[in-house]
Image (cartoon, rainbow, N blue to C red):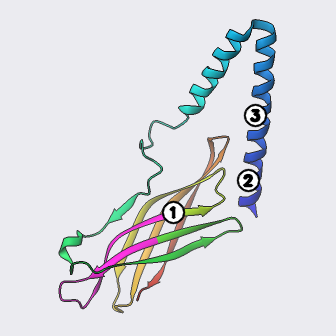
Amino acid sequence: MLYLLWSLLNVGLFIFFVFICFNATKLIREKLGIFASVIFVFGLLSFIGNSNSDNEEPNSSQIKTWNFIPEDSLKSNENYFVSIDLENTLVSKYTLGIKYGKDKQGQSNIPISSNSSTTGLISGIHWRPVSIIVNRTNDNNKFDYSVYGVLEWKLLGATIYKQAKEYQGNAVIK
């Protein structure tokens, strides 16, 4: 429920901000002229376009993947994928994806790579996985996993709070 309220707060503040910008542009046009209002709009758009922080990667929309072993060390063309729900909220879902394959003898399942992502309504909340560990177990049909990350609570793009999250469990594979 908190996620939904935070998303609604972000949407409401954004709509209010757009309303204020339209009124400011109208006021600037009346007081200083059309040229000044055009400069104001382009200046505002340039700030909005460059709102990414400097420490983020340029292609931050891509999902970061943790690689455990090279795929060529496994039996060829036999890669599988399992998806685990880490957390289900009212409006979004946090998932872990594990890609695995068989060893060269075709006996043991070995994790190749993994990633974590969020789906659903994620307005104002940004999940950033920091570390993903996937280990084999004695049972060939299970992996142990640990996912560490930070949930960033944002208000109009500014980070208000960073919440550490940790998920651990077993992934049952085919």
What is the quadrant of the N terminus in the image?
bottom right
For marks 1 and 3, the one nearer the N-term is: 3
Label 3 to label 2: alpha-carbon separation: 16 Å
Q: What residue is pinned by disc 3?
A: 17
For marks 3 and 2, the one nearer the N-term is: 2
Q: Position of residue 126 (x, y in %)?
A: 58, 53
Q: What residue is pinned by disc 1?
A: 117
Q: Nearer the viewer, residue 84 or 43?
A: 43
Left-right relation of 38 to 72: right
Q: Which mark is residue 68?
A: none
Q: What residue is pinned by disc 2?
A: 6
Q: Quadrant of residue 100?
A: bottom left
Range of residues picked out in magenta: 97-117
State the residue at coordinates (81%, 11%). 30
Q: Secondary structure at mark 3?
A: helix
User: What type is the residue that disc 2 sits on?
Assistant: Trp
For marks 1 and 2, the one nearer the N-term is: 2
Label 1 to label 3: alpha-carbon separation: 29 Å
Judged by depth in the image, the label closer to the viewer, 3 or 2, is: 3
User: What type is the residue that disc 1 sits on?
Assistant: Ser
Left-right relation of 105 to 8: left
Q: Secondary structure at mark 1?
A: strand
